[in-house]
Image (cartoon, helix red, strand yellow):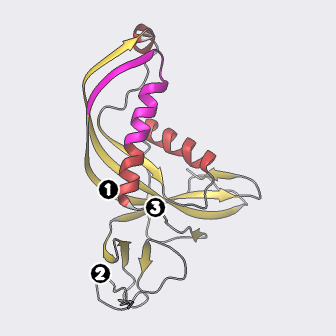
Amino acid sequence: MSIVLQPLKCSSCAAPLKSKERDRMLICEHCGSTSLFADGKTSPVEFAIVKPTVEEKDSLWYVPFWVVNTDVIVHHERISGGGISRAVTGQKQMRGVRDFYICAADEIPEEYARVWNMELTINQPEFTTIPEFKNGGRMVMTMDKETAKNNAEFIFLRYEAEIPGTLLELDYDFIVKSTKVLYLPAYKTTNNYQLGI
C-alpha cells in the first residue's frame, strides 16, 4: 500500500498552509488570506467577523457560523388544528429568501448551538463587522458546507413541526442560493457561553 500526501496550498498565493487542529479555515502565514479546506483541497471563502455589542469580563471567543442563504418555497401544507392559532399569534414563518445560521464549532456544546441556530435564524439580526479578531481568540471551524446546508433544512423542518398544530403534509423547495462564514463573538465562563451581540 502506498500513500501520496499532497501539501495544502493557499488559494491566493499558493504558499504551503499549516494547521495543527482540524480547522477548515486555514490562514496563510505568507499573504494573510483565508482558505476553506474541503474534499482534500483548498478554495477561497467569504467570511466576516462581527463586532461585539456586549462587553463582558469573561473570555472572548469568535465562534464560526455558516450562514446559508436560501429561498424556501412552500407549495402546499396540511395542518390538523392550530392553523388559526398560527395566524392569530403572528407566528413567524421561515419562508421566502432568508439566512439560516449554523454553528460550525464542535467546541460549543449542542444545547447552546441548537438555541443559537434557531434564535438567529428566526430573528435575522443585523451586524457590524470588524477587520480582525480583536481582543479574543478564533474557535476552530469543524463543520463542512454540505453538513451546514443539511442542518439548515433540518432547522426549517423542525420549526414547521414545532409551531401550533400538527403538520400532516408539507410540499416545499429548499433552494440554497449562497453560503458564507460569519464569526460571532461569544463569552465563555467555566460552564457557560453567551453570545456577545
Determine which quarter of the picture holds residue 2: bottom left
Which residue, given by chain and number where applicable, does mark 1 sit on? Answer: 179
Tell me which corner region of the image, top left, top right, bottom left or bottom right, holds residue 28. bottom left
Residue 137 falls in which quadrant of the image? bottom right
Label 2 sits on residue: 11
**Which type of secondary structure does the marked residue at label 1 adopt?**
strand
Q: Position of residue 95 (x, y in %)?
A: 31, 31
The residue identified by callout 3 is: 143
Secondary structure at numbered mark 2: loop
Q: What numbered label is drawn on residue 43? A: none
- Check the image and report above or below for 28 versus 79: below
Amino acid type of disc 2? Answer: Ser
Q: Position of residue 15 (x, y in %)?
A: 34, 91
- Which span of residues is magenta-colored? 153-172
Residue drawn at x 56%, y 67% as measured from the top left: 139
Q: What residue is shown at x 75% (from left), y 54% (from top)?
A: 191
